[in-house]
Image (spheres, helix red, strand yellow):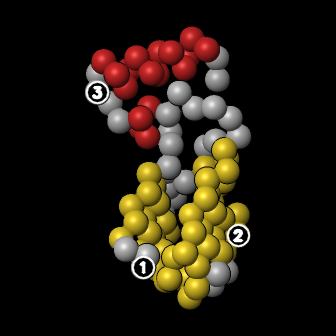
Amino acid sequence: MSRISRKLRKWTTDVLDVPQDIVFDLPRLTLIGNRQLYIENHRGVIHFSSEQLILAVTEGKLLVAGKELIIRAILPEEVFIEGIISDIQYEGKGNIG
């Protein structure tokens, strides 16, 4: 992403009060306790097992670890998982913002 494009996107979020996840196409996570996780703006499932979920996101990967993980619902840009969630990691490719 060019420097001008980043500055324009930053200006858009600051001045127009548009959420950064929309402008920068970032994943949005909603965690309910350690039992449910709703993820928006993913780009596909890379790996899934009962102990790990790896999702592609615009600027890298999102890793979710736990036990008894199941996918309750999956849509083109949304996924809802349940289980005992013990860890969430974001592995980014670059600098956002």
Q: Quadrant of the N terminus?
A: top right
Asked if residue 84 lies left or right of residue 48, the reply is left
Where on the picture, by quarter, is residue 96? top right
Q: Position of residue 85 (x, y in %)?
A: 51, 76
Q: Amino acid at mark 1?
A: Arg
* Residue 71 appears in the picture as rendered: no
Residue 74: x and y in percent read: 49, 69
Report, in whole angstroms, how far the alpha carbon at label 2 lies from the one at label 3: 35 Å
Seen as rendered, the residue at the extreme bottom is: 68
Q: Is residue 51 visible?
A: yes
The residue under the point 65% across, 75% down is 52
Where is residue 19? Give x, y as percent: 35, 36
Of labels 2 and 1, earlier in sequence is: 1
Above-or-below relation of 44 to 17: below
Q: Amino acid at mark 2?
A: His
Q: Closer to the observer: label 1 or label 3? A: 1
**Residues packed near mark 1 inside 10 Å, few (<14), some (14 to 19) or many (20 plus):** some
Residue at 71% in and 40% down? 93
Q: CA distance from mark 2 to mark 1?
A: 20 Å
Residue topped by disc 1: 35
The local secondary structure at tag 1 comes to: loop
| Residue named by callout 3 | 17
Q: Which mark is residue 47?
A: 2
Q: Residue at x 36, y 71 (%)?
A: 32
